[in-house]
Image (tube, rainbow, N blue to C red):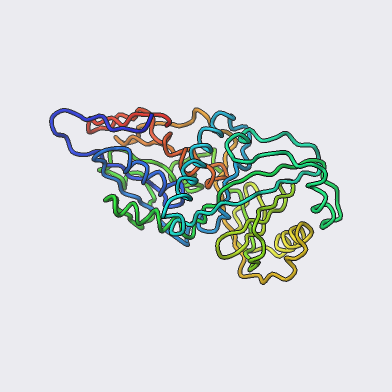
Amino acid sequence: MLMQAAQSQGGRDAVKVGVLGAGVIGLSTALRLCQEVPGIDVTVIAEHFGSATTSDGAGGLWEPYKLGDTPGELINRWGGETFQHLQELYFSPEAADAGISMISAYQLWSEPHEEPVWRDIVPHFHPLSFAEMAPFEAAGRCRYAHGWCFTTLICQTRFYLPWLGAKLEAAGARLVERKLTSLQELAGYDVIVNCTGIGAAALFGDKGVYPVRGQVMRVAAPWVKSCYFVNEDNYIIPNLDTVVLGGTAQRGDHDTSVRAEDSRRIWEGTLRLMPSLAQAKVEHEWVGLRPGRDTIGDDVLAYIDGGLTVGKDIGFRCCASSDLYGSGSWVIVSALCPSGWTIQGLYM
């Protein structure tokens, strides 16, 4: 069921919604609200936009990642809806502007590994035979016990974020660059949607969210046309203009500086996987702090603070590109606004 605004009697004004955060989750959620709630008044408020966000540096691959104990039903619901959205964009005239591409991906494991719960979402998913793994083993001089291949999508956020911003402005939403220090600054909004990532800890006192430090390298390697992953250690993700080499997933680490030891591990690990990267030129290195939490599920909350109804977007678990669209439908759960309007709906 898509989100809908219940039309109130008496000609009340449109419900005013403030979306906090301008990463891929925040902008996607704001656009979803504009598209699905007739007459809504949406403002996106964030300290950082565009290249200053964590989303801007992401590899952008659709593959649910670092999911902890997230229920499989939610992974498939959010991830499946996001995959469908990106696939529709890929086959639309807007694919280039939005930074969407389709690609083959190979996952290799040193030990036997259970197939992912999302395997039925993607096209062409199949376990790799020993013959299919042999070239990887020869290149890396190592043995793999298991692996799989599938077709997936890349959402390169360097293009996708500006595309979302343009769509929002065309829909009448406002984008406000502003640092918030208190919820009291949001007086006048009927509903607030929290998409602040790790910023939720300071602004909302959210003790469940923590940083997951990610460091990557971007290199010029135009001959690399597929994605490759080894365990959860190293990966190679081609984007439209560079190839992303990674990575790290360091829980509770707030350091945003590039570390030489991580650079060395990433370079050596991806070189074992694909020796031709020795000829690649390093364009730049980047560090971002992904928001993580130990559990998702029924903690979509609506709580009242000083007259505001606050909906918490729970579509972040270190894999925003895989949840950017589906989670937007869970943002607000039957939230009764002070103005008398009601925004209703759970999932699509």
**In the picture provided, is 228 more to the left or to the right than 298?**
right
x 51%, y 47%: residue = 198
Q: Residue at x 66, y 59 (%)?
A: 245
How far from the left and from the top, in percent, is residue 221? 65, 66
165 left or right of 73? left
Q: Is residue 110 left or right of residue 343?
A: right
Left or right, 120 with reference to 78: right
Q: Nearer the viewer, residue 121 or 57?
A: 121
> Taking 4 as reference, is 161 above or below it?
below
Whether 319 is drawn above or below 305: the answer is below
Q: Residue at x 35, y 57 (%)?
A: 166
Q: Looking at the figure, which quarter contains the N terminus?
A: top left
Q: Locate residue 64: give its quadrant.
A: top right
Locate residue 263, reporting x and y percent.
70, 63
Q: Position of residue 183 (x, y in %)?
A: 35, 44
Task: Determine which quarter of the picture holds residue 17.
Answer: top left
